[in-house]
Image: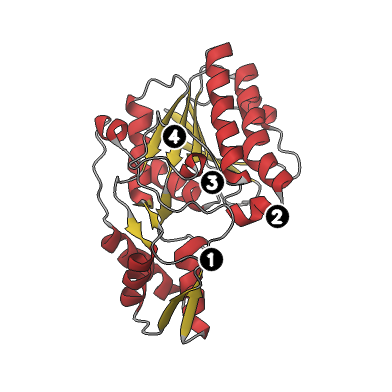
Amino acid sequence: MKILIIGSKGFIGSHAYSFFSKLSEYECWASDVVVDYTDDHYILVDSSNANFSEVFEANTFDICINCSGAASVPDSLNNPLRDFSLNTFNVVKLLDAIRKYQPMCRFINLSSAAVYGNPQKLPVSEADPIQPVSPYGLHKMHAEQICQSFYTYWGMRTCSLRIFSAFGPGLKKQLFWDLYNKSLAQSSVTLFGTGNETRDYIYIDDILQAIQLVIEKTDFVGECLNVANGRQYSTFDVVKNFYRQLGWNGAIKFAGNNRAGDPLHWEADITKLKQLGYQQQYDINTGLSKYVQWLKELR
């Protein structure tokens, strides 16, 4: 099976490329906007005007996984057009190129729990209302709708994965990376919020397990699927856990003010994912241990 990873230089994309390249049943190819002079299975696209028609006209793929796009709520508020271009418009361009040249190629789009905004109830299921509270969440919602429309109107096999709070080695942004950098220069850290906010964390290797199960077992009928572990942790608890494993003993403070676009609580209903055979392999403690080990190797 020939598989293409779009956004292969990013956090999830780079792990996905490494993971599928090691499996004998897959011939794995990569694509991104960063020049790569050594990989014979790499396709460079133009960062300013990605032409995916050239990619799919010249090559044949069974699966395309879109790991590309922006992944910052604050940046989506400051640069909404950029966020729309990367998270929504590029999905249209990808799917239209597949429609023209390889309509049988299955398409997995990495979406986000941000589409839910502040859920009306927890755990939140795929059938519950989606009410994003940031341009980032809105643009991810639009991308999901585009995937559904390409299945409805052209019969293209698509699926969107609503990934919750992903983390793991190589992630140089978001909460744990921010905590690490603050610990290098400060004896105390001050964070947004109250510390009572919650997230449903999932380690990168478990995300890859979920993606493989989707490839092998889903119908690709434009559906959306939660990718998480079905358990919420407070920010205060994970911050304490992270710093304990890092060996940093400074003071932790919370400013009490939430950032615009940040939901308060997330916990996923992962019934559908479990029906595919998903079983969590890395709990929060093990995942943070591996992340901290990677951070220490950077020094």
Cα separation between marks 4 and 1: 48 Å
Q: Residue at the location (76% across, 44% down)?
A: 48
- Give coordinates of residue 41: x percent, y percent: 54, 40
**Badge 3, how many Cα within 10 Å: few under 14, some, many 20+?**
many
Q: Earlier in the sequence, mark 3 or mark 2?
A: 3
Q: State which mark lies toward you, 4 or 3.
A: 3
- Placement of 129 over or under 46, stated as above or below: above
Q: Nearer the viewer, mark 3 or mark 1?
A: 1
Mark 3 → mark 1, Cα distance in angstroms: 35 Å
Tell me which label, 1 or 2, sits earlier in the chain: 2
Sequence-wise, which precedes: disc 3 or disc 1?
A: 3
Which secondary structure, mark 3? Answer: loop
Which type of secondary structure does the marked residue at label 1 adopt? loop
Q: Nearer the viewer, mark 3 or mark 2?
A: 2
Per the model, the C-alpha gap separating discs 1 and 2 is: 19 Å
Q: Amino acid at mark 1?
A: Asn
Circle 1 Cα neighbour tier, 10 Å, few/some/many (<14 / 14–19 / ≥20): few
Residue identified by numbered label 1: 257
Q: Answer above or below: position of 131 versus 254.
A: above
Q: Which residue is mark 2?
A: 78
Q: Earlier in the sequence, mark 4 or mark 1?
A: 4
Q: Which mark is residue 8?
A: 3
Residue 27's tag is 4
Is tag 4's residue or tag 3's residue first in the polypeptide sequence?
Answer: 3
Q: Nearer the viewer, residue 202 or 298?
A: 202
Report helix, strand or loop for mark 2: helix
Q: Is residue 229 left or right of residue 76?
A: left
CB atoms of marks 3 and 2 within 8 Å: no
The reply, left or right, for residue 266 in relation to residue 104 is left
248 lies above or below 215: below
